[in-house]
Amino acid sequence: MAKKKILFLICLISIYYLAWHVQNNLLFNSDVSWLMLATKRLLAGGSYTNDFFEINPPMILYLYVPPVLLANFFHFSNMIAMKIFIYFIATISLMMCYFFTEEIFVEKEMRAIFILMLAAVFLLFPLNEFGQREHLMMMLCMPYFLRSAGMTSVVGILAGLGFAIKPYFLIPFLLIELYLFSFRRIEFIIILLIITTYLMTIFLFHFDYVRDVIPIVKNYYQTYHTPWKIILFNEPACFAYFTLLFYGIRRHYLASREFYFILFLALIGFLFAYFAQQSLWYYHALPVFSFSILLSVLLLAQLINQQSISRKEYFTLTLFSLSLFLYLFLKLNYLWFWHAPLFLSAILLFLLALLFLLPRHKTISTFLGLMLFAYPAYQLGNIYTTAIYYKNLFSGFLDAMKPYENKSIYFFSNAAEFAFPGTEYTHQTFTERFACIGLFSERNKNFYINAINEDIQRYQPEFIFVDTRHKNEKTKLGYFGNDQINYVKIFSENNAFKKTWGSYRYLISIDGQPLYKFDIFKKINKMQIADRDSR
């Protein structure tokens, strides 16, 4: 028993260490970097309209207050402060989940497997989305999913904060509460009270978010969405479908059926939340991906622990495994057609070996496990290698930014990924109220130009970086989209901006196509302006 506990602790510590090592190898997340700056401006008395034009409601800014204060007080970088904060939240959540699972799992091995997988979900699976809204929500709300039939008040508070981060997160909460149908529970009242108070806070203290931000965001997302065909049949959604089907096959053989059914409802809820957002960003799919893996691991562990299976169940599981195999084969054939025959040959040889070496029951569970987790292994590996590749590519941009370290800067670009996390590594002062100009359109042109002009007059940035990338196939497919907007020409239609822009002179261009290309303008003094105009 003592050896098993030691092994469990070694595995848990290894996950913590590996996650820290992985994060050290990746760039700081762009959204998290910007949101920490927005939180800092909020704490300084700023507002949505005048200081940080952020499309998310303020709950995420409230939750980022601890790492921002930690960074300021101890002079940590934002990256270190965020990692400490996430590790703290993950540890608290894991401790609560470990305590609650004592009543759920009779077998201690099942409990250990679940906690270790949960630690991996909290710390490893986010990869380059570490600290994102979905990531925080999962850690805050996970104790709720384990104790939703009888939680403590603390769990209710954490869940209320987590579900309030995005309106979409309320979908799994509503599904589970409709299933429990017990609205006098103290935890339900606490969550409802937090969300109600939060909504009142938005209208009382952040009404400019409702008045100014929501209309612009609404207009943008009416035109920006991924086609339903792609959303419904992309990899995270298909993995979730197979997990739900696996649950349907195994539901009658499970102990703690209510616990599994709540995970099942949570997965369905997050799947609907993913569909509602209609975008393919990994962090949007993170709850779907994570809950699919958690549920699949538990279902597979239960199957392996089962002493024997009937012929009917064996036949059903065989069909399920073959359908998984067929999906993976067709997907691989579509992506890399020359790998598909190799994949088929390797799997057939592996299956024949299993049939000779293991009993029928162990053969099907092993084969099923291989098929079920082939996609998550591929997905995580692909995301990590892509993130590493992008970091190496981005290093050229950081080198081009080094001459402007510790300077005040402004960006004219529709991609936030340049300024964030670029300014984290170059220690520049970002003076813009927008993370980027990605929501700019003909409809809101005057609002944007006036706001940009006010920012430049207010902060007097020393350098302005104007995005001048050319549109080509690599830019379109592999990197941040570029609408080829001639920012200076369009903004100069406004006389006030044109006058302000007169204080800037072209300095140099930095060109790292297809990733980046910027014209850099430097602020000049009155004598330099007079000298330029006299030529």
Image (tube, rainbow, N blue to C red):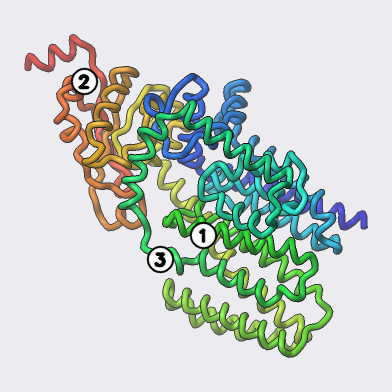
The three-letter code of the residue at mark 1 reads Phe
Q: CA distance from mark 3 to mark 1?
A: 15 Å
Query: Mark 2 sits on what residue?
Result: 500
Front position in the image: 331 or 27: 331
Front position in the image: 224 or 344: 224
Quadrant holding the C terminus = top left
Q: Is residue 196 above or below residue 364?
A: above
Q: CA distance from mark 2 to mark 3?
A: 45 Å
Q: CA distance from mark 1 to mark 2?
A: 47 Å
Helix, strand or loop status at disc 3: helix
What is the residue that sits farthest to the top in this orientation?
Answer: 527
Query: Mark 1 sits on what residue?
Result: 272
> Residue visible at 81% across and 73% down?
305
Query: Taking 177 as reference, is 421 left or right?
Result: left
Locate residue 439, reporting x and y percent.
32, 41
The three-letter code of the residue at mark 3 reads Ile
Q: Earlier in the sequence, mark 1 or mark 2?
A: 1
What is the residue that sits farthest to the left in this orientation?
Answer: 535
Query: Taking 273 as reference, is 279 left or right?
Result: left
Instruction: Kindly indicate whether the residue at mark 1 contacts the one at mark 3 (C-beta within 8 angstroms).
Output: no
Helix, strand or loop status at disc 1: helix
Query: Mark 3 sits on what residue?
Result: 230
The three-letter code of the residue at mark 2 reads Thr
Q: How many numbered discs?
A: 3
Q: Earlier in the sequence, mark 2 or mark 3?
A: 3
